[in-house]
Image (cartoon, grey):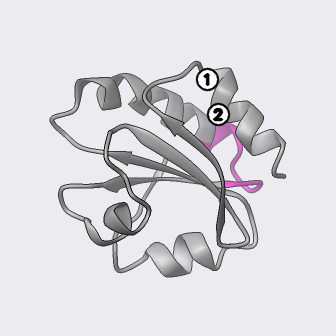
Amino acid sequence: MALEITDATFEEVVLKSDKPVVVDFWAVWCGPCKMLGPIVEELSTEYEGKAVVGKVDVDANQEFAAKYGIRNIPTVLVFKNGEVVAKQVGVAPKKTYQDFIESNL
């Protein structure tokens, strides 16, 4: 299951991780976010132990959404060593996210 990431846990979970971190910035009311949700859940299971896969609800956690300039959702950022290494705005095929993760393992 994808990890619920908040403003309070973002630095520890994402920026200090020794594994690649996939962060889905989403909101409850966002239709495309609901389409992406099952893909994010599948990725979290497939890459368990190899990468961290989490979600940030932008309505409840605005600090890091603002810091990373999230203007449209869903936006998925991939972090490695605390730096953004990949970005996907909008829903993309599952393979797009798999490729992001694979290239950063």
- Tell me where residue 60 sits by quadrant: bottom left
Marks 1 and 2: CB-CB under 8 Å?
Answer: yes
Q: Residue at x 37, y 52 (%)?
A: 70
Q: Is residue 12 left or right of residue 55?
A: right
The percent coordinates of residue 65 (x first, y second) are 35, 61
The percent coordinates of residue 100 (x first, y second) are 72, 40
Residue under numbered circle 1 = 94
Q: Residue at x 22, y 32 (%)?
A: 30
Q: Residue furthest top?
A: 93
Q: CA distance from mark 1 to mark 2?
A: 6 Å
Q: Residue at x 19, y 40 (%)?
A: 28
Between 69 and 94, which is closer to the camera in this rendering? 69
Residue under numbered circle 2 = 97
Answer whether residue 73 is magenta in the image.
no
The percent coordinates of residue 94 (x first, y second) are 61, 23
Element carrying mark 2: helix
Bounds of the magenta span?
Answer: 44-51
